[in-house]
Image (cartoon, grey):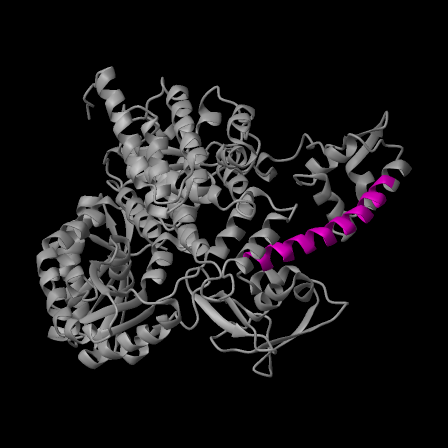
Amino acid sequence: MSEAVLSQEEEKKLIVNAYRKLLKSIKSKMDDTDRNNIRMAYEIAVEAHSKQRRKSGEPYILHPIEVARICAEEIGLGPTAIVAALLHDVVEDTDVSLNQLKEKFGDRIARIVDGLTKLDGLYNVTSPQAENFKKVLKTLLEDVRVVLIKMADRLHNMRTLGSMPRHKQLKIAAETTFIYAPLAHRLGLYSFKTEFQDLAMKITEPEIYSEIARKLQETKLERSKYISEFLKPLNEALEEVGYPYRTTGRPKSIFSIANKIKTKDVPFEEIYDLFAVRIIVDVPLKKEKQICWQIYSIVTDVHTPIAERLKDWITTPKSNGYESLHTTVIGPEGRYVEVQIRSERMDDVAEKGFAAHWKYKGVNGSPDVFESWFDNVRDILENPDSDSVEFLNDFKTNLFQEEVYVYTPQGDLKILPKGATALDFAFSIHSNLGYQCSAIKVNKKLVPFGYKLQNGDQVSVTKSSTQKPNENWLKMVVTGKARSKIRSAMKEERRKAGDLGKESLQRKLKSMKADFDPNVDLLAKYFGFNSRPDLYFEIAVGRIALNELKTYFTVEGGKLIEIIEEIQPNTPVSDIEPAPKAKKNLIKPRLLINGESADKFEYSLSNCCNPVLGDDVFAFMAVNGGAKIHRTSCPNSTHLMANYGYRIMKAEWVSSGDRSFVVDLKITGIDKGPGVIERLTHSISTDLGLNIRSFFIEGKEGYFEGKISLLVLNKDQLNVAIKGLKNLDEVSTVVRVED
C-alpha cells in the first residue's frame, strides 16, 4: 500500500494539529509549570524523533503525541503522565539521555521514562519480552503510571498495526492477548480490554472477525429500534427517581460474541444478548446504593427478570474496583437483555479504571481494593529465584477475571480467583501460614488442600512448625503468589541439600586425587545436567552414586578422563545399536519459512492444532534448529509468541502437492433415530469424496454429538466439508476441534 508523500510544511502542520488535539484532551487542572513542562517535552520529542519514521511512513513523533492523548483523554491521567508519555521513547530510540531528562524535569518523570525504556543486551535470557515486561511491572508498585502509559502505548500500536509485517503483527497480537488484555481488566480499564481483544482477534482470526463485524453492521438499525422499544416504557418510570440519568445501548465486543459462538456452538443469528443496556444516574455519593436498587426495582417491574442472572457488584465491588448492578430481563419478542445500573462515579471508575479509582480514593469509605493485589504482585516480584518467564506466568494468574468470595474465621472477606483452592487461601493470608499449613477446614469440616473454594465458604487453617512445602503442592494451587512462594521454598530446600551434595563430591574427588574445577563441570555434562546445583542435588538425594565414579573415569594429572568401552573386533554389526534418529515425515507440502524452503529447518506440523494447507500459520523454532508449524489460532500460539517471540518466524504455504492433512470436526444435531450415521458418512464419503480416518458418535436425550477425523488436501476442501455437513437437516453445528 503506497503512502502519500507529504511536504515538510504539510508534515509540520500534521504534527502541530496532533499536539493541539492533545492539549484539548487534557481535563486535569494545570499550573504554569505543568504547561511549560508539556511544551518543553513536546519540543524535545519533536527534535529527537525528527529523522524517524513509523512503518506506515508517517513522522514518528505522531506516536508519542497520540500516546499522550490516550493517557489524557481515555484514561484521565494528569500532566506528569502526559510529559512522560511524550518522552517515553526518546531514551530508547534517540541520543537523549536519562540524566538530561532528570535535569530538565526532575526525578519522578525521569523514573517513569526509565521504567518505559526497554533493557539492552537481553540475548542470554530465556525470554527478552518477559524480561522487559518484568522491568515495567517492577515500577508498578512505585508508580502505577508507568504501566498505564505502557497500556496507552500498546493500544496505539495495536490501532496502527496494519503497516507491520504479518509475522510481527502476530507476535504483538499474542503479547496483547496474553498479558495486556488481562492487565487492562485487572486495572479496571474495560474499554482497553475489549479493544485489545478485538484488535488482536482482527489479526489472528481475520475471517471470523470480519464476518461478525459485517453482521453487526447489517443488524445495527434493527438493534437501535429494539433498544428504543425496550427503553420506551422504562423512561417514564425512571423520571420518577428524581435524579438526572442517561441510557446507552451498545453491542458487545466482537471478541466476546465470537467466544460465545465457540463455547455455545451456536451461530450468530441465535445469540440474542448481543448488546447491553446501561442506565447511569447522577446521584450524590450517599444515595448511590439506594437509587441504584430503586432503578433495579423499576426495571424488573417493567420487564420480567431472570433471578439467577442478578450480579450485585455494588454491595461487594470487584477486586479491581468495579461497581455496578447487572441483571438480565426478558424484553419485547422474548429476547434476553442485559441491563447494567450504576452511578456516574461508578461509570467513571469502570471506564477509566485505576486512574479514576485514585481520583475517588477514600471518597466512598470503602477499603482500597488495589492494596491486596499490590501485595501479591510485590511477593512475586521479590522472589529472587524466579526467571522472567516463570515470573510472567505467575503474574498472569493475578490478572483473573472471575472471582470467588470467602471469609476468615473472624468474618473478614477475601477475594480470590475462581478455581482457587484451600491452600491458595492459606498463602493469601500470609506466606508463613502457607508454608506451615498442615490442615484446612472449610465451614468447620476438614477438606483436602486442593479443595476448590466456593462463594461464602468460611476457611480456617491449622499450621505446624514441622510442615514444609513439596512438589505436589504446586498441583494444588492456582494463584501466582502461592506458586511463587512454594517454588521459592523448594529451591531453598534444594539449595541446602545441594550444599551437602557438593561437600560429598569435594571429598570424593579429593580421595581420587582429582581437582574440583573443572571436573565438576565435566561431571554435570556427563550426567546430563544444565548446572552444578542440579548435579549437587542429585548427589545429595542418592540418585548419583559417587562410589561408582571410578568405574566411569580414570584420573590423569588431577583431571577426570572418561573410560570408553571399545567394541570388540568380532562383534556382529547387527548387535551394535545405531544412534537414535529423529523421525522424518517423508511426504510434506511445500512451505516457506522466512522466504526459504522449510525443509532446511527439518520442520513438522504441530499436533496441538493440526494445520492444513491454506491455514494461516507461523513457525516456532526449536533450540536444535528444527521448526514446529502452528496455526495462528492455535490454543498454544498466544503463550509461544508472548514468551518466545524471538523464536517465531514467518511461514507460508506455496503449493499443495499430494499431502493429506488430518482434521477433527465436532458435530452436534437432532437425533432423528436410525439412519443418522449413514447420512453423515454418505455425505462425507460419497457427496464430498473425503476419507474418514475415525468416527465417534453418541446419542443424548434427543440430540447427538460426534467427533469425526477427516483427511483433507487443503483449507478450501475443509470449508466445503463443513458447509456440506451443516446443510444436512439433522445437523445443528459443525466446528473444527482445537486441542
Residue extending furthest toward the front: 32
Q: Quadrant of the N terminus?
A: top left
Residue shown at 43%/37% (left/top)?
Answer: 645
Highlighted magenta segment, given as a residue range? 480-506
In the image, is residue 718 above or below residue 728?
above
The x and y percentages for residue 566 are: 71, 31
Q: Is residue 379 magenta?
A: no
Q: Is residue 491 magenta?
A: yes
In the image, is residue 513 above or below residue 241?
above
Q: Quadrant of the C terminus?
A: bottom left
In the image, is residue 164 above or below residue 414?
above
Residue extending furthest toward the bottom: 444
The x and y percentages for residue 81 are: 44, 39
Viewer-proximal residue, 499 or 712? 499
Residue shown at 22%/75% (left/top)?
Answer: 329
The x and y percentages for residue 105 are: 51, 30
The x and y percentages for residue 102 are: 55, 28
- Judged by its main secondary structure, the magenta piece is helix
- Residue 589 visible, this angle: no
Viewer-proximal residue, 16 or 513? 16
Residue shown at 59%/48% (left/top)?
Answer: 381
677 sits left or right of 446 in the view: left
